Amino acid sequence: MGKDVIVACDFNTAEETLRFLDNFTEEKPYVKIGMELFYAEGPEIVREIKRRGHKIFLDLKLHDIPNTVKKAMAVLSRLDVDMCNLHAAGTVAMMEAAIEGLTRPDGTRPLLIAVTQLTSTDQERMERDLLINEPLEKVVMHYASNAKAAGLDGVVCSPLESPPVHETCGGQFLTVTPGVRFADGDKGDQVRVTTPEKAKELGSDYIVVGRPITQAQDPVAAYRRCVREFVG
């Protein structure tokens, strides 16, 4: 599967989002719709962006009992998104139920990936707040292995974790990596970060980039720079 840049449209209104996407008259970037926008505008914003020809990663990070997640995924599968996700911490049973719900009657489904540890989490926070005392990388690899065992397509992880995830789960197991900033940019609230070029070297399959593109003075130029550095 080819590499791609996913633009995180973390806006809180459809108007802002569509105005941002109107900048792109030549390209149709892959778009991430997260909780902020989806909770504000509902499924219609997904339908509208799909009508405009964009691929969509619906980033809602489901995490609940297996039956609830299964039913929720069955609803999301009807939105014709290209990728969606859940928290690997919800257990293998929950992830297996999600696959069942997401799979349509004709056997097709969006890509399904699992969040391992958020890129805002570091070893200290994981131990202090979550009472997980194993090394961070070991935890990520364990969650990734569980996701693969459940039949998922990949994980969300830091670009720094792409090499061990691929080593553990195979080269076809996708790594979708936020925490990407330009070398001359601000890290914001991310902790485990790299540049697009470094993410490429580390083997990320997709990078998710928000503020460096959406808040750039020239978003199209920033997007093209990101594609150039990551895809080549």
Image (spheres, grey):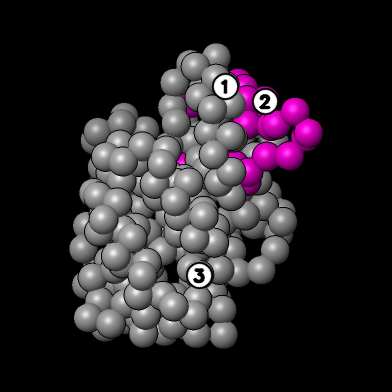
Q: Which amino acid does label 3 sit on?
A: Lys
How far apart are labels 1 and 2 at the CA level?
Answer: 6 Å
Question: Which is more toward the observer, 45 or 185?
Answer: 45
* Residue appearing at x 37%, y 33% in the figure: 132
Q: What residue type is labelled 1?
A: Lys
Q: Disc 2 vs disc 3: which is toward the camera? A: 3
Residue 70 is labelled as 1
Question: Which mark sits nearer the N-terminus, 2 or 3?
Answer: 3
At mark 1, the secondary structure is helix
Question: Which mark sits nearer the N-terminus, 3 or 1?
Answer: 3
Quarter residue 218 falls in: bottom left
Marks 1 and 2 in Cβ contact (< 8 Å):
yes
Question: Which mark sits nearer the N-terminus, 1 or 2?
Answer: 1
| Region rendered in magenta | 90-116
Disc 1: CA contacts within 10 A as few (<14), some (14-19) or many (>=20): many
Residue 149 is labelled as none
Q: Where is residue 93 in the image (x, y as percent from the top left)?
A: 60, 21
* Residue appearing at x 44%, y 82% in the figure: 224
Disc 3: CA contacts within 10 A as few (<14), some (14-19) or many (>=20): few
Please name the residue that numbered disc 3 is placed on.
Answer: 28
Question: Which is more toward the observer, 138 or 99?
Answer: 99
How far apart are labels 3 and 1 at the CA level?
Answer: 31 Å
